[in-house]
Amino acid sequence: MPPSGLAFDYARQRFHTVLIALALALVALAMLSLAAPLLARTVLGVRVVYAGAAGVSLVFAAGGIAGLVSAAEALALPFGPPWGPMRLALDPLSAWFLLILGLCGIAASAFAFGHVKGPEAPRRLVPYPLFLAGMALTLLAADGFTLVLGFELMSFASWVLVAHEHENAENRRAARLYLGFAALGGAALILCFGLLAAGVSAGAGFAALRATPPDGLRALAILVLVVIGAGSKAGLVPLHVWLPLAHPAAPSHVSALMSAAMTKVALYVLARVIFDLAGPAQPLFWGAVLMALGLASAIMGALRAALEEDTKTLLACSTIENIGLITLGLGLALAFRAADLGALAAVAAGAALLHALNHAMFKTLLFLGAGEVLYGAASRRMDRLGGLINAMPWTAGLVLLGAASAAALPPLSGFASEWLLLQALIAAWRVGDLAFQIGAAAATALAALAVALSAAAMLRFYGMVFLGRPRSPRAAGATELSGAARAALTLPAALTVIFGLTPGFLLELAAPALRLLTGAGAGLSALGGVTVTVSEGGAGYAPLIVFVLLLILGGGVVWFARRQAPGIVRGPAWDCGFIAPPHHLPFGNPATQVSAAGMAQPLRRMLGKTLLAAREKVEMPPPPGNTAPARLQAGFHDPVLVLISGPLPRARDRLAALAERLRDFSLRQCLGLGFAVLLALMALLIWLERR
């Protein structure tokens, strides 16, 4: 029950103060971007930009918490498009994702601050505040125009950051592909909100759109358009091919923001349109569509992560897998809501929101850790790394927490949200549709497969990068991080542990957002904010108890091992039966260690040939009896990327050739063509008005 009298007025005034503070934070980011060309000339100026971005991100995080514990309000700005002012609002759903953006922005900006070594190119510094501003504006938008404006600003600024090293041919290719998908997503969202606003006389404000939800073919078209628009930015299969190319091309702190925050902003747009603006209830097949896309993304992303040999590309593919799991949870919540199972819808939506937050934290940690490895060991290739746990122990320890959370090991944060998603999947048999029940059973098995593949990918990532012996002289001479960069990794690492131990508290904090998404919040209960219990079925999870038991078990194993062992004796690592390395390889022969391709060989042979057209070829030295080593050539192709780089360009060329024939039209033919297009558009408008 809302407060009354003077207390109610005070609450309203305080919330308007939060919105005004957030609007001023957007203005501050715009001013930082305008001043960046001058500030980029000195080390102090560059640090001012990144410190300012970190401060604004702190405001975003605080505003997100305030939005979760206060009533929703809106603020009309004194400017906007011709049909009305731009509007800002902060409700529990946008506040949850604003909290994610704020936490990620603090860590990424602090990491960039810690690695400022001199003046920076303006093309790398100017877009960074705009990138943060675009994401925040998308989350705070209360009308279609403001949301699309923020979404396009986010896309354009991130594209500039991806293309900042345009001298590299791979970066240019990644930037072109990313720009194409960004244009596709923006066009789809414009059409989506155009259809939502069709027949609405009060403009494209969210309140007016909620009052007239779409139905029939218009609703189906909105579903398709928002999946294309938001899914292309989130990295849902088959709109994912830009992500493994663009994220590694960007600077490490930008990669962390793109993977941890930008993809969540896209999922927020998806949830906002489908769960909120499209009406209080949708057909069951809407949820099935999201579940199918989420499963395909989870399997494809996890398998690619288990096969990649570049650290940042591996983490980008892992993002596709986790975005798929979040989308699976959203689709399951939508299906439960359609079946009038509000409590289970709250469980599935809670799993999705919780995993969005948890993934943002451990993926920020992993990308910043990969960036620190790139700074310290000068390589992203796993076959040129190894043994960094000795040269970079602090980084190795923090990244271990992130990798363990990404592998869903208890009691870290990744396990809590994925366990909750599994409980929702197990309860999907309560939906009365037989086809959905069969599909949900298959989805449970496929989701478990994706989680297992992700764990294998994280094991391979950590083992190849930090364990074993250095595979190159530069890896042997790697240097450790310090200062602000160390703090930047420590923040998400600490939150990964804290969030893993207190999932109940986070779900209580997210309860208003769950009620907005599902209309119910009774599917979950928490004891003291720590123990989580699923009301439907009674399953429970107590992370603190699990943590204490693991500590006792681990301590007992260490004590027993030390008691039985006579002492610690250091010796050379086993060389797999190879002869001693030559003198010009003082750190050991890399051939005596497993390679990235070799470690991925079982999965590549079992699953890669079917899903990714994986191939292997062993090259033997030509003369018989030659003692030179054989070489294994292994690789794979993403089928969607092959389609984009093959048949689609040929179809584009054919269409361009047909369009070229328009130049030969006479004046009468050109006028007739224009008149026909005008009549077609008028007919479309009349049809939309009648709908």
Image (cartoon, rainbow, N blue to C red):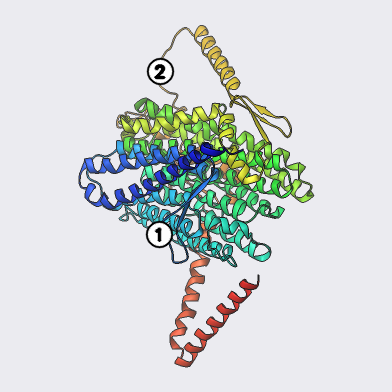
Asked whether residue 556 appears in the rendered view, the answer is yes
Check disc 2: other Cα within 10 Å, few if <14, some if 14-19, many if 20+: few
Which of the 4 quarters of the picture holds residue 62? top left
Image vertical order of residue 541 relative to residue 363, above or below: above
Say which quadrant the C terminus sits in.
bottom right
Q: Nearer the viewer, residue 671 or 435?
A: 671
Residues tagged 2 and 1 counted as in contact (Cβ below 8 A): no
Residue farthest along the front direction in this orientation: 5
**Percent x, y for residue 609?**
58, 49
Q: What residue lies at 58% left-to-right and 65% top-to-bottom?
A: 200
Image vertical order of residue 477 relative to residue 672, above or below: above
Q: Nearer the viewer, residue 565 or 293?
A: 293
Mark 2 → mark 1, Cα distance in angstroms:
71 Å
Residue farthest along the left direction in this orientation: 42
Amino acid type of disc 1?
A: Phe
Q: Which residue is mark 2?
A: 571
Q: Which residue is mark 1?
A: 79
Q: Nearer the viewer, residue 394 or 580?
A: 394
Amino acid type of disc 2?
A: Gly
Check disc 1: other Cα within 10 Å, few if <14, some if 14-19, many if 20+: few
